[in-house]
Amino acid sequence: MKLKNETHYDTKDLKKLFYRCIREYNKESPSEKKTDLIITIKHSKDKFANLEKRAQKETHIKVWLEQNKDWYENTYKGGLYKGRYSGKASIQGNYMLLCIPKDNLDSEKLARLFIHEYEHNLGYHHNQTSGGQRGIWNTTAFSNFAWANTYIIRKTEPIIKPKPNIQLVKFERARRRLEVVIHKLKRDQALVKKWTKKVKYYEKLLTAAGKFN
Ligand SMILES: [Zn+2]
């Protein structure tokens, strides 16, 4: 399993859950197996972010907001919105893309999403499900996903860059600037020397030739 993790969740924790999903799937269906999975996992976009601002410019958003005011005010702004889980996968292939929320990650939903995409990798289309409804992500044949909830997916600690000292930054900038102008000054001094020499040379030559009065 190759996991390209573009989320702030711990790679090992994600992998542990996915391996468990595969093991659970094998219990149901021992003959089906994919081992060379290539998974990309990302944060899903929060399509409700800055919605009020966007509503001022776009009429359809304004209308939507008016119609869903209660949900928006209470659920979304109240922090109860759980985010979106979506994915894509190659049918009978080994690639899948998973998009999961930045916060309130639900291991069970992620496990269901993974298995849904995994089934695509095994060759199933949405209307082509083994065991009836298995391939449809929230009505899968795995009626019990309780095991998934025992998996805690931790967020990795954000790398906090120390704030640069502004005076130090300005000092560095001034020092570099000084270096540049000194370099330029030295070059100009060399040029002054060079052309002074030339002028003197021709002056001497022309004077000797009587061209100057
Ligand atoms: Zn699907």
Image (cartoon, helix red, strand yellow):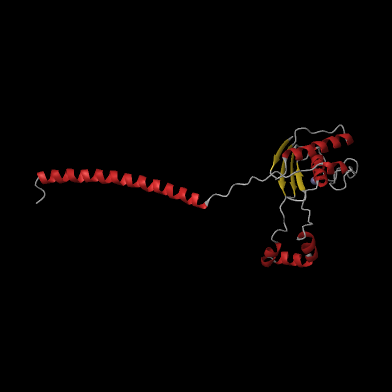
Image spot of residue 139 (x, y percent)? 88, 47
Q: Is residue 90 above or below residue 164?
A: above
Residue 152 position by quadrant:
top right
Residue 199: x percent and y percent?
20, 46
31 and 16: which is toward the camera: 16
Q: Is residue 41 left or right of residue 178?
A: right
Q: Quadrant of the N terminus?
A: top right
Q: Residue at x 32, y 44 (%)?
A: 187
Residue 121 placement: quadrant: top right
**Residue 151 appears in the picture as rendered:** yes
Given residues 39 and 75, the one toward you in this image is 75
How many numbered marks does the figure carry? Answer: 0
Q: Is residue 172 left or right of residue 22?
A: left
- Give the image location of residue 30, x and y in percent: 87, 32
Q: Nearer the viewer, residue 92 or 56?
A: 56
- Identify the residue at horizontal 17%, vertical 44% (top origin): 202
**Foreground of the two, 128 or 131:** 131
Q: For residue 113, which quarter of the picture? A: top right
Q: Is residue 145 visible?
A: no
